[in-house]
Image: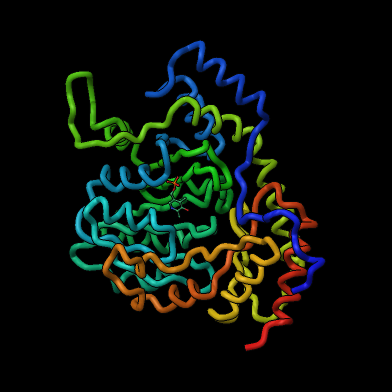
Amino acid sequence: MKKELIFDHSITVTQPSLPNYASYIAYVKDIWERKWLTNNGPLHEEFKNRLKSYLSTTNVELFTNGHLALEISLKALELEGEVITTPFTFASTIHAIKNCNLEPVFCDIDPVTYNIDPTKIEELITDKTSAIVAVHVFGNPCELEAIQAIATKHNLKVIYDAAHAFGVEVDGNGIANYGDVSMFSFHATKVFHSIEGGMLSFSDEMLSPILNALKNFGITSPETVDYIGTNAKMNEFQSAMGLCNLEIVDKEISSRKNAYTRYMEELTGLDDVQLLKLPENIKPNYAYFPILLKDHKLRNFLSDRLTKYNVIARKYFYPLCSQFECYDYDGNETPVALDVSDRILCLPMHANLDVKEVSQICDIIRYELGDYSE
Ligand SMILES: *Cc1c(COP(=O)(O)O)cnc(C)c1O
């Protein structure tokens, strides 16, 4: 331990962005005067339209959170049987599949991008397969064309968990425009948030009425309930936060870029540390800063040591979803994912992280890796 590198306050892995207080309060005052709190209020509608234009996409619906949005999308697509997905994701992805009575079939990941490996999808397709649920892990886009080609050939739906990928573009095209459906999370810990919140973008506009019904108890008119729906509506206070944060999101992403650039400058070339390289043809959102350590023991050592300096790094995603106690899989069918999960560590990354703080975190990492003995 090097005492002078200890932070006097906790450096968390993420921190919610907060807009100008007065601008949020101005929206709240309007809500008070209108007395319209939820169920497609005017702020909900305005937020929806502003998102369409920010994300350059056509069909979107809003939800109370990303998880229920994902679950509802699987239901709306009337999927059955098996769904090919990745174990290297947040619990939500697999819970959504399971909650729709679908069977997740775990496909291994690419060791460089950590996304589902398209070359391993086809061997998992059976006559029960109905969809591919892929995740843009850490906001880094999946191999969109390869996945779509497989889906088209085998008549499968493609659902992207784009929870990490708000604002990302590929060859100048918004990431919301790929697959049959993409889910975005607006949770407080994400690059862009509405406190809690979620969004679906989708290619077939005919999905809109069923998505709207499913998030409102399956009600399709005052006296008709056509589906066994749930309650997953976004309210006016969430929409207000989303509208305020949309004003500052570009600034937030550019602050993240400064932190990202400093990390890359200081950690590139370090033995035992592999960095995630962003492809040239994308506009990234700098959602996370993952590093891959040489082995499991070194990852755990570094994570523990960082905590002693008040730096809270997180083991995203560890364990694999396929290793969770609540299911009955074992994780061994995806050796690459298992290995990455054992060695991954996400360093603090948010818009309020100062580049000096980033440098200090990197000093700690260099010092502690030097101090490590096997
Ligand atoms: C955050 C997250 C979700 C869930 O979104 P919520 O808005 O928190 O419900 C789903 N998938 C991934 C990969 C996530 O990171």
Residue 212 visible? The answer is: yes
Q: Is residue 21 left or right of residue 188?
A: right
Residue positioned most to the top: 33
Residue 127: percent from the left, percent from the top?
18, 65
Residue 34: percent from the left, percent from the top?
48, 12
Residue 49: percent from the left, percent from the top?
49, 28
Give the vertical position of 223 relative to 166 (above or below). above
Q: Is residue 250 left or right of residue 146?
A: right
Give the vertical position of 307 relative to 194 (above or below). below
Q: What is the quadrant of the C terminus in the image?
A: bottom right
Residue positioned most to the bottom: 374
Q: What is the quadrant of the N terminus in the image?
A: bottom right
Q: Is residue 138 left or right of residue 210?
A: right
Residue that appears at 70% across and 41% down? 251
Residue that appears at 56% across and 49% down? 168
Give the vertical position of 127 relative to 56 (above or below). below
Q: Is residue 98 left or right of residue 52?
A: left
Give residue 337's quadrant in the image: bottom left
| Front-most of residues 302 and 280 | 302
| Front-most of residues 298 and 38 | 298
